Image (spheres, helix red, strand yellow):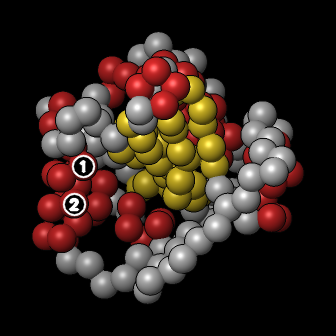
Amino acid sequence: MTINDYIYPPSLLNDINIEISEGFQIRPLAAHDFGNGFIQLLSQLTVVGEVSSKEVLKRFKTMVSMDPLSYYITVIEDIATQKIVGSATLVIELKFIHGVGCRGRIEDVVVDKEKRGLGLAKSLNQTLVSLAKNLGVYKLSLECKDALIPFYEKFGYKKDEGNNFLVQRFD
């Protein structure tokens, strides 16, 4: 595979000490992962909708071509089956504040229901936190359901007292 087959350069993970269960590897999302269960995995998190392979690859190419890169979709592959069993996204927002800094957001964290309890979400989180630090974000946030707050607090996330998360849905 070439570097253009990945959502971001795999070399960005070289300086990160990745701890992961044996038999799995963490890496950037690759174009061929759409045939290895990536979309099906996302459907365990939320509604994906009816999307064609053509639409998915078009979106992938759009994300890859952004300058600067904004989407750092990181996956866990089961080495034996080559199936994608975990995924999380680091989104980088460019800002005018904080010295024209960057803010990071962790989104779309999901581990295959058959692989939960193996520490894979922890591995994804540690990898994306390190990647965010390496990319120079001034703040990293994560939105989650109330039931998951204690899980994410184990990794250093805190409620930002006085701030709330509001949403408008258009689907």
Q: Name the quarter where the C terminus is drawn.
A: bottom left
In the image, what residue occupies the spot 30% across and 54% down?
Answer: 33
Which amino acid type is shown beneath numbered disc 2? Arg
Report x, y in % for residue 73.
40, 46
Q: Which mark is residue 59?
A: 2
Q: Give 56 or 115, whichever is nearer the viewer.
A: 56
Which amino acid type is shown beneath numbered disc 1? Met
Q: Few, some or many C-alpha atoms within 10 Å of disc 2 (few <14, some 14-19, many ≥20)?
A: few
Q: Which residue is mark 1?
A: 63
| Helix, strand or loop status at disc 2 | helix
Residue 171 showing in the rendered view: yes
Spatial separation of the CA atoms under disc 2 and disc 1? 6 Å
Q: Name the quarter where the N terminus is drawn.
A: top left
Report x, y in % for residue 159.
81, 47
Indicate left or right for 133 with 30 as reference. Answer: right
Q: Give 78 or 29, whichever is nearer the viewer.
A: 29
| Helix, strand or loop status at disc 1 | helix
- Contact (CB < 8 A) between labels 2 and 1? yes
In the image, what residue occupies the spot 32% across and 28% down?
Answer: 10
Report x, y in % for residue 129.
59, 31
In the image, what residue occupies the spot 42% across and 35% down?
Answer: 95
